[in-house]
Amino acid sequence: MLDNALWISVALFTVSIMLNLYRVAVGPALPDRILALDTMYVNSIALIVLFGIWLNTKTYFEAALLIAMLGFISTVAVCKYLLRGDIIE
Amino acid sequence: MIPTQRWLPMPLLSLLLLAMWLLLQQSVSLGQILLGSLLALVIPLITQPFWERQPMLKHPWLLVRYIFRVLGDIIIANLQVSKLILDPRGRMSPAFIEYPLELTEMLPITILASSITLTPGTVSVNLRKDRRTLVIHALNTGDREDTIAQIRERYERPLKEIFEC
Amino acid sequence: MIGFYTVMEGVIAFFLIAGGVFAFIGSFGLARLKDFFMRLHGPSKTSTLGVGCVLIASMCYFSLIEGSLSLQGMLITIFLFITAPVSAHLLAKSALHYKLARDPRTLDDIEELKDGEDDEKPNGENGHLP
């Protein structure tokens, strides 16, 4: 049962990342693209955690934590750039 | 005796840092607790000049109740938003709402804006510079006044109670 | 004892699938809805809850196979729930700054979206330098 659930979940997250990729490519304005990238890193965290469950190891938690932090910081930095034309004033 | 304010400027932050350190280390041995406590004492002292003055937490237990209420609302919000997204005809009436704030301190306003974003059908968009108005985008509003009253009753009043009176 | 394991397995499977479905709905909304402000709703709420569900499932799983409470996933969950509204707010703010196109049904009679209003640089408050 767990195996099937794991595979269904992985499939759903993969499709989500594909949809985000579509929005990155099409998105008419810059904020659309940033939003799509933001969603993409959130989904990739879930994929990494699922991979960790599949391999039965907890090592990947640290990778997921790092991606969460870097993703948030980069989203904030890019938004700041859009808002002010400058990151550090 | 040295007043507590001097060497423990932000007790809540210190507690949070200690908890985070123990969670990261995945152990509660004596050494980790000592090291974590040291960090929790030193980091607030070093970073104190960067912080704005924090309002005092008057009723911590109400904060716990507030967190559980927001968690419950997050689940309801997700079911509602999912229904709206999956609606094949896409009937929606999005609107921008100007929400007049009663709160004045920065931290409660931040918590309020975050709760608004995470809960039913609304995203906080902009805090005007005078800190009096919060602009909200709602995905599907029947009546603006209704939404404002609901947010005020459900989130702002409890926050006001927790932080100010 | 077998009953307990079966129940836990069911709970974990439920959280895994619920997380996948929520994340899918969020991304579907991102791809389908018509204007930026509506698209913002999907990822900021639904995707966050989806990943939260998966992290809770993994926490349950590792607690179950190790026989001790494993709380590391909690850290990522809390971090995501704190940061998702912040990045959504910043994105919405930059979209307002660019005055992105809205869906024609939107009621948008606020002063930020009127023509000619200019968002000036911040003054000395809020820790920004002038």
Image: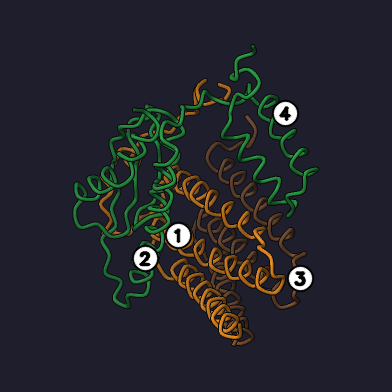
Chain colours: A brown, B green, C orange
Same chain, labels 2 and 1: no
Number of residues whose C-alpha sits closer than 10 Å to that of mark 4, classed few (under 14), some (14–19) or many (20 or more): some
Taking the image as shown, residue C79 lies to the left or right of residue B29, namely left
Secondary structure, mark 3, is loop
* Gap between marks 2 and 3 measured at Cα: 34 Å
Q: Amino acid at mark 3?
A: Thr
Query: Does the residue at mark 2 contact the one at mark 1 (Cβ under 8 Å)?
Result: yes
**In terms of image quadrants, where is residue B126?**
top left
Task: Return the residue at label 2.
Answer: B81
Q: Amino acid at mark 4?
A: Val
* Gap between marks 3 and 1 measured at Cα: 29 Å
Q: How far across and down, in percent of the image, does residue B16 sit? A: 61, 40
Q: Quadrant of the C terminus of chain B?
A: top left
**In terms of image quadrants, where is residue B86?**
bottom left
Task: Return the residue at label 3.
Answer: A57
Name the residue at 65% across, 40% down: B17
* Gap between marks 1 and 4 measured at Cα: 36 Å
- Above or below — where is C56 with respect to C114? below
Task: Return the residue at label 1.
Answer: C45
* Gap between marks 4 and 3 measured at Cα: 34 Å
Name the residue at 46% across, 46% down: C89
Mark in front: 1 vs 4: 4
Secondary structure, mark 2, is helix
Number of residues whose C-alpha sits closer than 10 Å to that of mark 1, classed few (under 14), some (14–19) or many (20 or more): many
